[in-house]
Amino acid sequence: MSDVFDSIDYTKLDDIWPLGDIEKLLQFEDRYIVLDKGSVSICIYTLDGDLVHRISKMGKGPGEYISIIDFTLNDENQIILLTRSKIIFYDFKGQFVREIPLNTIFSKIQFVKADQFLLYSPLMKNNTGKLMNKGCPITLFTVHSGFDCLDSPVDGYFPAIFVEKNLFSKNGTSILFSHTSSPIIYEYNSDLKGKYEIKINYGTLHEFPELSYQNIDLNHVLNILNRDKSITYHRPNLFHSSEWIISNIQNHGRNFFMHHISTNKT
C-alpha cells in the first residue's frame, strides 16, 4: 500500500442523522454525497463531515420516489437519482428540479457530459420470457433526444443475480465499465467514440461460460459458487485515477485489487 498511498486520512461524518446502509459515496468539490439505502435518502456533507442537506422524499408525486437505485452527479451542481420509474434531478440543497419518466428498469447511471448519461440494464427477463431493454446492456440517454443502445445486444453476459456495486467509474474524461464475471474492464472516452479493453491480470478468473440467457438455472449457478471453492471471479466495484484502477475479486469473500494502468500489472 505504501507504494501507492503517501498517507491515509479519514473524515467522521456527522451522526445527527445516523447512516444505516451506505451504498455509494461521491465527492463533488467541497461536498460528500452519500446514498443511504437504509433510510432511502441522500445525505450531503461538507468535507469536514457536517451534514448540511438531506434528500428524503418518499412518495409517488413529482420529485418523490419509492426507492433509490443509484445516483450520479452532473457538472451543473445537481444530484441525479435513478429510481424504478424515473430519473429525478435535485440541486445540492435538495430542491427538486425536474424528472424524466422511464419505461424500462435500469440499475446503474453514470453522467457523461452536458445532458448525456450512461444507463446499465441488467439482462433480466420479463414475465413473458423476453430480455428487458431488448438485451441492450449499456444505453446512452440524452435528455432531449431519448435512448439509444450504446453496445450491440449480447447473449454471453452474466445475469443480474447479485447485488452489483460500482459498475461505472468516471475520472475526468475517462469512464470505466465492467460487469459481473467479466475479466475485461472497458474504457470509454467522453465522446463515447472510443472503447478500449483493459485485461485484468489476476490469475484465472471464472467467466461462467455455461450460462445461457435462454435457458438459465440460477440454482445451478449458486450451487457452483457454494460448492467450488476454487472459483474466483470479477465482481466490479470500480474506482480509478489516471494511474490506478481499483476493483473487487470474489472468492468466498471480497478481495480488492489494484491495477497499474501504464504497466498493465495487477
Image: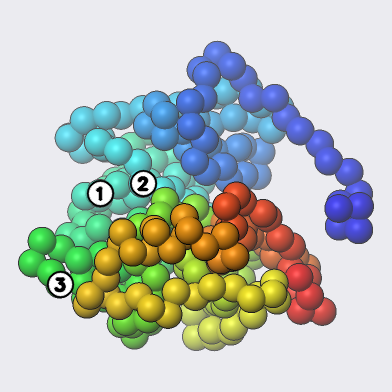
- In what element is the residue under mark 2? loop
Residue at point 57% right, 23% down?
A: 51
* Number of disc labels: 3
Residue 11: percent from left, percent from top: 72, 30
Alpha-carbon distance for marks 2 and 3? 23 Å
As drawn, the label of residue 69 is: 2
- In what element is the residue under mark 3? loop
Q: Is residue 221 above or below residue 31?
A: below
Q: Is residue 74 visible?
A: no
Specify whether 153 is left or right of 264: left
Residue that numbered label 1 is attached to:
84
Q: Is residue 17 visible?
A: yes
Residue at point 61% right, 37% down?
A: 31
Residue at point 64% right, 25% down?
A: 13
Specify whether 89 is left or right of 54: left
Residue 106: percent from left, percent from top: 31, 59
Asked if marks 3 and 1 touch (Cβ < 8 Å), the reply is no
Camera-side residue: 171 or 259?
259
Which of the 4 image quadrants contains residue 118?
Answer: bottom left
Q: Quadrant of the C terminus?
A: bottom right
Q: Amino acid at mark 2?
A: Ile
- In what element is the residue under mark 1? loop
Name which of mark 1 and mark 2 comes first in the sequence: 2
Which of the 4 image quadrants contains residue 188?
Answer: bottom right
Asked if marks 1 and 2 touch (Cβ < 8 Å), the reply is yes
Give the crowd class for mark 3: few <14, some 14-19, many >=20 residues within 10 Å. some
